[in-house]
Amino acid sequence: MTKLALLLAAAAAVATTASPAAAQVAGIATSSTEGVFFRAAARTAAYQQIQTQYAAQIQQIGTVRTEIQTLVKSLDTNNDNQLSDAERRAKPAVVTQIQQKEQQINTLAAPISLAQAYALDQIAREYDAARQQVVTAKRIQLLLSPDAIQWGPPTVDVTDDILAALNTRRPTVPIAVPAGWQPSQQIAQLHQTIQQISLAAAQQQAAQAQAAPAATTPAQPASQPPRPAGR
């Protein structure tokens, strides 16, 4: 499976109920580490708390992004949704404005990303123990990632089992980042992957909403033509 396929698969798992616990095949099993972290109850709760705590910053980020879109559109003089070097050179002041606003977004988003990474770090401290709990209980001899095999029966996957163990061991995590704390490279990469999965999930939900039958939307009454002015 490609990385994109794995991200979409993990995103799809959010909307589905967990399958019954399954036994491994001949001591071999698979699990999606990213899927476990993404679906972890502690991560979901922590991200919701962070979203509430930084609601003002998140709203401001949305506003600045809209401003950037407006500025980019002003550069696109031929309306082809692409910016050429000539279009950028034509309005250097606008390009500078865009860069400044992008930096503003980075500044606003920094504490949010840091809090999310810290939550993931706290979950990660219990992940190995949760995984080992499942490995021992099911007598697994070899645990692989889903993309390491070309095919396997559904019973080979123990992602849900590890998720259940992790949720029991670590149902919640703090989001208050200690002074001076910085994520390790591994946690930073995990945070980026979770962001990609979240984006894939949002895009999938949007696509499903657009694909819904038009009949589900109540018909709107025909608009009345404008009344002529004067007598």
Image (spheres, rainbow, N blue to C red):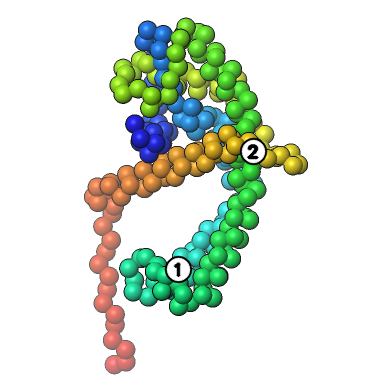
The residue at 45%/78% (across/down) is 90
- Residue at 38% x, 27% y is 147
Q: From this viewpoint, is residue 20 visible?
A: no
In this orientation, which residue lies closer to the viewer: 66 or 132?
132
Label 1 sits on what residue type?
Val
User: Residue 72 shows which numbered tag?
Assistant: 1
Q: Which quadrant: the C terminus?
A: bottom left
Circle number at residue 194: none
Gap in angstroms between the C-alphas marked 1 and 2: 33 Å
Residue placed under numbered mark 2 in the picture: 183
In this rendered view, identify the residue nearer to me: 86 or 219: 86
Relative horizontal placement of residue 219, taking residue 27 as reference (left or right): left
Residue 161 on image: x %, y %: 47, 18
Residue 13, position as x, y percentages in the image: 40, 31
The location of residue 68, given as percent across then percent down, is 50, 65
User: Seen from this angle, which residue lies furthest right?
Assistant: 179
Query: Reading the chain from its start, which is encountered first: label 1 or label 2?
Result: 1
Vertical relation: 122 (above or below) 63 = above
In this orientation, which residue lies closer to the viewer: 215 or 112? 112
Residue type at mark 2? Pro
Query: Residue at position x 55%, y 13% from top?
Result: 133
Tell whether 75 sits left or right of 118.
left
Residue 107 higher or lower than 23, as above or below: below
Q: Residue at x 63, y 56 (%)?
A: 107
- Residue 10 quadrant: top left
Q: Secondary structure at mark 1?
A: helix
Q: Position of residue 207 (x, y in %)?
A: 33, 47
The quarter in which the N terminus is drawn is top left
